[in-house]
């Protein structure tokens, strides 16, 4: 009997829409497991970060990431069950990040998820990482459609329109660096270790001076982004200071960089809100932890009376609670995957949208 058949039988014999879902996220350098009920109630949320291991290499080393996930995943599943006070028998489904991400890293989570689903004979849900970041907002607020998500992470920078629940349309994306990636590269140029985003955020808030840096607006009607220009401008400032034997002024650079990035992100998001009549703006992804961005967006949305949702810090950076929240969409629509599904390193968000049933 295939997984899909067994799932169907379960549904026919007493499917209930509330689901206690164990979610696994291993797409990059965090081994994360959560248990989420009904797409909203977080019963457990544990994250083991590998940042200390990768820091000395200046970024994530895929092979090391996979090995660390293998070492940690079982312990994290046990910890999540302990935290929730549940046993494996209490679970209704397993959700796992299918992509995008590092293929070896994704496969570790997927293997663990398949083993659990097979052993427990419960449905398996393949989840999109960015859908997870977006639906992290559902852990703290009721989403009103249409809404617009501003996704700012280490690998993605996108404006995503959700006309209905689980329907994703990307209206703008970065043409080069993701915003988190640009933060990390600029931080490295001014002497901070990976991941540099939090260091830049702190410095920017402390800075008394500012180095004014360019903004890439692209074509007037475009919702796309480009951060490679501002990144190169920072590298120029740093190199010129070095050549002149002057101190590099990291705080003033951090503030200038942060102001440039925030200006472009907020201006484009607010224009899209108006054009598409979105009822809410959802901020998400690792860079949503940025205090400067959170404060500026909060102020602008208050001024323009746009309801804004921002998840708490622990749901901004990679975590599995967000995978449980997004996985619940598929649970509600009974759209499960079979045991033959595999990792999708370049998974399309739009294709992951809920098929109307
Ligand atoms: O979403 P995430 O945890 O992983 C990906 O899916 O990429 O995002 C990680 C990114 C890193 O580039 C990190 O530097 C950035 O989020 N980040 C920040 C802050 N906290 C994390 N960037 C700016 N300010 C922060 N406070
Ligand atoms: Zn992420």
Image (cartoon, helix red, strand yellow):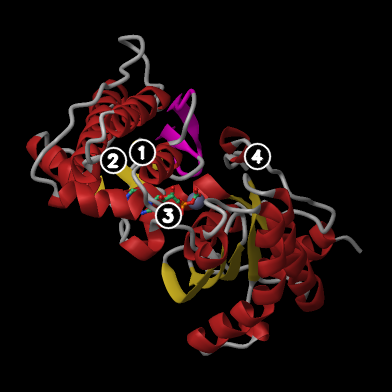
Q: Name the residue that disc number 4 marks.
A: 347
Q: Name the residue that disc number 2 marks.
A: 281
Which class describes the residues within 10 Å of circle 4: few (<14), some (14-19), or many (20+)?
some
Disc ID at residue 150: 1
Q: Is residue 78 above or below residue 192?
A: below
Q: Is residue 179 above or below residue 17?
A: above
Q: Name the residue that disc number 3 marks.
A: 193
The residue mark sitting in front, 2 or 1, is 1
Residue 125 visible, this orientation: yes
Q: Gap in Å between the C-alphas at discs 3 and 4?
A: 29 Å
Query: Is disc 2 placed on a helix, strand or loop?
Result: strand
Indicate yes or no whether the magenta region holds residue 243: no
Q: Is residue 66 above or below residue 239?
A: below
* Label 2 close to label 1 by CB (< 8 Å): yes
Mark toward the start of the polypeptide (2 vs 3): 3
Q: Is residue 203 above or below residue 186?
A: below
Residue at x 24%, y 26% (from the top left corner): 213
Mark toward the start of the polypeptide (3 vs 4): 3
Mark toward the start of the polypeptide (1 vs 4): 1
Mark toward the start of the polypeptide (2 vs 1): 1
Mark toward the start of the polypeptide (4 vs 2): 2
Q: Nearer the viewer, residue 266 or 87?
A: 266
Tell me residue 206's x, y (percent). 14, 52
Query: Is disc 4 placed on a helix, strand or loop?
Result: loop
Mark toward the start of the polypeptide (3 vs 1): 1
Instruction: Quarter of the image for the N terminus: give it.
Output: bottom right
Tell me residue 44's x, y (percent). 48, 77
Ligand 1 under 8 Å from disc 3 Cβ: no
Q: Gap in Å between the C-alphas at discs 3 and 1?
A: 26 Å
């Amino acid at each position: 009997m295939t997984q899909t058949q067994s799932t169907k039988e379960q549904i026919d014999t007493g499917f209930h829409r509330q689901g206690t879902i164990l979610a696994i996220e291993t797409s990059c350098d965090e081994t994360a497991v959560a248990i989420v009920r009904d797409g909203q109630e977080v019963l457990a949320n544990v994250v083991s970060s590998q940042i200390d291991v990768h820091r000395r290499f200046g970024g994530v080393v895929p092979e090391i990431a996979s090995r660390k996930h293998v070492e940690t995943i079982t312990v994290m599943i046990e910890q999540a069950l302990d935290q929730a006070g549940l046993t494996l028998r209490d679970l209704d489904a397993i959700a796992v990040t299918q992509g995008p991400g590092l293929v070896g890293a994704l496969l570790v989570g997927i293997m663990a998820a398949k083993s659990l689903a097979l052993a427990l004979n419960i449905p398996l849900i393949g989840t999109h990482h960015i859908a997870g970041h977006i639906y992290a907002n559902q852990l703290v607020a009721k989403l009103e459609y249409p809404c617009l998500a501003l996704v700012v992470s280490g690998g993605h920078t996108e404006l995503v329109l959700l006309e209905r629940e689980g329907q994703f349309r990307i209206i703008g994306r970065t043409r080069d660096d993701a915003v988190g990636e640009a933060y990390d590269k600029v931080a490295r140029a001014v002497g901070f270790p990976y991941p540099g985003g939090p260091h830049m955020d702190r410095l920017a808030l402390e800075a008394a001076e500012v180095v004014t840096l360019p903004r890439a607006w692209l074509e007037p009607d475009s919702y796309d982004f480009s951060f490679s220009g501002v990144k190169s401008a920072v590298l120029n400032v740093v190199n010129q200071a070095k050549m002149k034997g002057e101190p590099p002024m990291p705080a003033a650079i951090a503030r200038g960089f942060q102001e440039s990035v925030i200006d472009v992100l907020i201006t484009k998001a607010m224009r899209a809100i108006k054009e598409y009549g979105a009822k809410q703006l959802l901020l998400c992804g690792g860079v949503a932890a940025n205090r400067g961005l959170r404060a500026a967006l909060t102020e602008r949305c208050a001024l323009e009376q746009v309801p804004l949702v921002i998840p708490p810090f622990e749901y901004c950076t990679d975590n599995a609670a967000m995978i449980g929240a997004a996985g619940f969409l598929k649970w509600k629509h009974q759209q499960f995957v079979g045991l033959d599904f595999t990792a999708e390193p370049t998974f399309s968000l739009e294709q992951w949208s809920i098929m109307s049933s």
